[in-house]
Image (cartoon, helix red, strand yellow):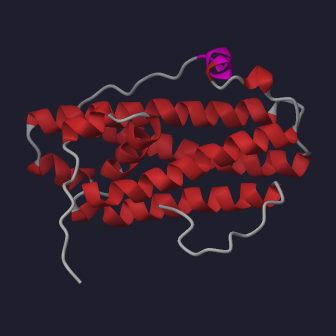
Amino acid sequence: MTDKTVPLPSRRALLGSAGKTLSIAGVAMMVGGYAPRIMRASAEELSSDVQILNAAIALEHEGIAAYQIAATSGLLDPAVVDIGVTFQGHHKGHRDELVKAVRTLGGTPVEEKSLDDYAKSLNAASLTNQTDVLKLALGLERGAANAYLGLIPSLGVDFHQVAARMAGDEAFHAAILANALGEPIPKNALIFG
């Protein structure tokens, strides 16, 4: 067996990445580890962290709004609404930690948009039944789990456990949603990543 070294993306490359990777980067960089980071990081790195964290906050706002739109759509059974509201609570917790981190780094957290703006960006008008809503949520949660797992090698050791825990949260959400959709349990191992 040979040891292959895989180049890790630069901070600038992470900033240029799309949606979910930024959300995961932000969560992983701040939860449980931003205080030591402040002591070791340059002003440029801290500014980049604030940008990444704000991108993550923006995506958490969108996730919170998505669950709100779904919960009030009239398309979901009451038990499914309860699950969505619970997941929304998880995302609110993520958002709150991200906001705290941005403020600790000296930044200003990004503000949320109106619920109508989120409904338009999520194309909520195209959702016509519970299955549509669950499929949308499942795709978002699977994407988030994979993004966390893909991010772990790019992070310093201080953040590996946090990123893995967040991937676990997202994988848990995906499993519940897949079950609600009646999807079969995957036959192969290593479902995510």
Residue at 39% over, 31% down? 55
- Asked if residue 183 lies left or right of residue 149, the reply is right
Tell me where residue 108 sits by quadrant: top left
Q: Residue 78 at what x, y percent from top left?
A: 90, 46
**Is 165 left or right of 39, judged from the image as shown?**
right
In the image, 51: left or right of 37?
right
Where does the N terminus fall, quadrant-wise?
A: bottom left
Look at 29% across and 30% down and name the residue there: 51
Location of residue 52 (image quadrant): top left
Residue 118 shown in magenta: yes
Range drawn in magenta: 114-120
Residue depicted at x 74% and y 29%: 69
Q: Is residue 177 visible?
A: yes
Residue 177 vs residue 13, the one in the foreground: 13
**Residue 181 image offset from top left, x and y in percent:** 82, 54
Magenta stretch, overall SS: helix
Placement of 129 over or under 29, stated as above or below: above
Where in the figure is residue 8, as x and y percent of width and height? 21, 53
* In-front residue for pair 79/123: 123
Instruction: Verify whether residue 95 appears in magenta.
Output: no
* Image coords of residue 45 (percent x, y): 15, 38
